[in-house]
Structure formats: C-alpha cells, structure tokens
Amino acid sequence: MEINIEQCRENDLIKRIISKSGLPIKLIKLLLRFSDAIYINAINYNVIIEENRAILILISSKPENKTGYFHTISLSNVLYKLRDIEKENDDIKTKLKAREDMIHVIIEKV
C-alpha cells in the first residue's frame, strides 16, 4: 500500500475526502470527530473509503515520523475516543488491525 505522507499531515485534505465519501451522514460526522482526535493527539494518519466503511490508518506519532512509532499517551487518547464513539453508537462497528507497522482502524455502519 502506498502511503502519501504529505496527505497524512494535512487534516483538511483528509476531512474533505471523508466529507465527499458518500458514506451515511452519521458515519461521516463520527469520522470527522475521530479524525480531529487523531490530529489533536499528533498522529500522522491517512484514510481509505471502501463501500460502507472507512479505514483510518495510523502511521506514526509526530514529530518522529517513523512508521510504527507511537507515543503511548497519544495512542491511548485516540483509542479512548474510538471506544466512546462505539459506546455511544450501537450501529457503528469498529475493529483494529496492526499491519506493516501501522494500525488500521476500521469503522463501519451496520
């Protein structure tokens, strides 16, 4: 998978991709909230939209920018936000997968 590091640093570009994804409005709103949490916690990330789900790829913590290197506190904050989203929304299903030194957060509406 090719990762565009410049895109990972541009939260506005990723938010535009999410906003124009064609996903259900509720899922778009949750993804935008979650992307803000990722950005605020200084994690480089990217997004892939597939059918009725989004995959947010957590790549690295800033400023190190080494793939697979995450600050524990930042990553914990992001995972707590994900947990809160899932608790508040019974119709949202989330999964985490570690691949190639990156964390894939899969979010879909069921």
Image: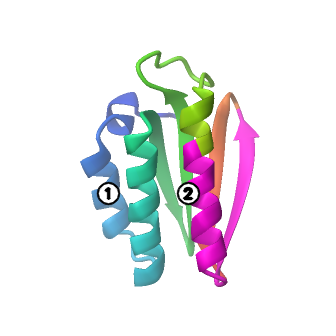
Under tag 2, what secondary structure? helix
Say few, some or many: other residues with alpha carbon within 10 Å of mark 2 (under 14 / 14 to 19 / 20 or more): some
Q: Which residue has dot 1 on it?
A: 15
Sooner in the amino-acid sequence: mark 2 or mark 1 = 1
- Residue 22, how many percent across, how many down? 39, 76
Query: Which is closer to the viewer, label 2 or label 1?
Result: 2
Q: Which residue has dot 2 on it?
A: 81
Say few, some or many: other residues with alpha carbon within 10 Å of mark 1 (under 14 / 14 to 19 / 20 or more): some
Residue 24 in view of the camera: no
**The quarter of the displayed image where residue 81 is located:** bottom right
Q: How is the image coloured?
A: rainbow
Q: Which mark is residue 77?
A: none
Image height check: is 76 above or below 83?
Answer: above
- Three-letter residue code for mark 2: Lys
Quadrant including the C terminus: bottom right
Q: Is residue 34 left or right of residue 110?
A: left
Under tag 1, what secondary structure? helix
Which segment did they paint magenta?
77-99
Q: Using the numbered discs, state the Cα–Cα distance from disc 2 to disc 1 in whole angstroms.
A: 17 Å
